Amino acid sequence: MRYLCDTKKAEDWGKPFSLSSPVNTGGWESQPSISADGRTLYFVSNRKGGYGGYDIWKSTLTANGWGEPENLGANC
């Protein structure tokens, strides 16, 4: 699954675009949610590096785009 994001300007939405790497991988990624300040993306994924099954991950927006996702742990 690939996240597609769009932006809202006034009352109109922009054209969707892919977040790409490092957020999108060959794994399953879904249920995106963005923090109120727009700088942290939370999502669920079964990507490599997790604890097994579907884990919650977060990625922080940097000057260069979305940062490397961080697993929130086995008991988040």
Image: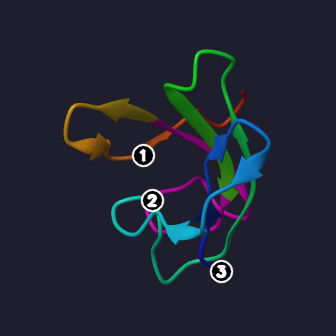
Q: Circle 1 sits in a helix, a strand or a loop, which is it? A: loop
> Is 3 part of what is drawn in magenta?
no
Q: Which residue does the numbered mark 1 point to in the structure image?
A: 69
Range of residues picked out in magenta: 45-59
Q: In the rendered structure, which disc, 2 or 3, sits on the residue that comes first in sequence?
A: 3
Q: Which residue does the numbered mark 2 point to in the structure image?
A: 23
Residue name at image x 74 percent, y 51 percent: 12
Q: In the rendered structure, which disc, 3 or 1, sits on the residue that comes first in sequence?
A: 3
- Distance Cα–Cα, label 2 vs label 3: 11 Å
* Rendered position, 68 above or below 2: above
* Rendered position, 9 above or below 6: above
* Rendered position, 70 above or below 6: above
- Distance Cα–Cα, label 3 vs label 1: 16 Å
Q: Circle 2 sits in a helix, a strand or a loop, which is it? A: loop
Q: Mark 3: few, some, or many residues within 10 Å (few <14, many ≥20)? A: few
> Is 54 part of what is drawn in magenta?
yes
Q: Tell me the kind of residue under disc 3.
A: Met
Q: Which residue does the numbered mark 3 point to in the structure image?
A: 1
Q: Tell me the kind of residue under disc 1.
A: Pro
